[in-house]
Image (tube, rainbow, N blue to C red):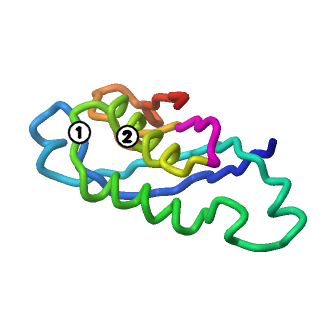
């Protein structure tokens, strides 16, 4: 088994419960850990034998920028579904950070982490 990591994918998306969050895009940061058998890719050095993280980043980008959810829990779950759509992925851990949460206190971010 091996682990493919994507860290700090920053995207603008329209997700949130409050009316202003549903009208205006805000920044999100995504981390993904994918478990998969990377043995063949290590032997062949062929992109077809591994998870193409460029293609994966593009799929995640489409979810964040084109779909809309009230909760970041649902957004993270949806990203996990996309990550698990490749049958070689045996486990995905997704962290979604909302970088400007709408709270009056100073808060660097709010986040959820799910396993799919």
Q: Is residue 65 above or below residue 82?
A: below
Name the residue tied to disc 1: 69
Where residue 54 sits in the image (x, y, percent)? 57, 68
Q: How many marks?
A: 2
Residue ID at (47%, 57%)? 10
State how far apart marks 2 and 1 are (Cα). 10 Å
Q: Is 22 on the left or on the right of 2, as rendered? A: left
* Stretch in magenta: 88-94
The crowd level at tag 1 (other Cα within 10 Å; few <14, some 14-19, many 20+) is some
Does dot 2 land on a helix, a strand or a loop? helix
- Residue 22 in the magenta stretch? The answer is no
Residue ID at (90%, 65%)? 43
For marks 2 and 1 on the same chain, the one whose residue lies earlier in the sequence: 1
Residue ID at (45%, 35%)? 109
Does dot 1 land on a helix, a strand or a loop? loop
The answer to whether the residues at label 2 and label 1 have Cβ atoms under 8 Å apart is yes
User: Residue 103, located in which quarter of the rendered image?
Assistant: top left
Q: Is 63 on the left or on the right of 107, as rendered? A: left
Q: Is residue 64 above or below residue 79?
A: below
Where residue 47 sits in the image (x, y, percent)? 70, 72
Where residue 86 sits in the image (x, y, percent)? 54, 51
| Magenta stretch secondary structure, dominant | strand
Q: Nearer the viewer, mark 2 or mark 1?
A: 2
Residue ID at (47%, 36%)? 108
Foreground residue among 6 and 11:
6
Q: Residue 78, labelled with which disc?
A: 2
- Residue 91 in the magenta stretch? The answer is yes
Q: Is residue 14 above or below residue 78?
A: below
User: Residue 15, located in which quarter of the rendered image?
Assistant: top left
């Amino acid at each position: 088994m091996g682990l493919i990591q994507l860290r700090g994918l920053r995207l603008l998306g329209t997700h949130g419960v409050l009316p202003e969050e549903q009208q205006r895009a805000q920044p999100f940061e995504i981390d993904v850990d994918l478990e998969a058998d990377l043995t063949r890719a290590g032997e062949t050095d062929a992109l077809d034998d591994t998870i193409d993280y460029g293609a994966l980043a593009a799929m995640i980008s489409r979810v964040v920028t084109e779909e809309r959810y009230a909760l970041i829990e649902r957004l993270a779950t949806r990203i996990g579904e996309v990550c698990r759509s490749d049958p070689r992925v045996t486990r995905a851990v997704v962290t979604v950070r909302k970088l400007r949460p709408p709270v009056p206190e100073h808060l660097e971010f709010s986040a959820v982490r799910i396993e799919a």
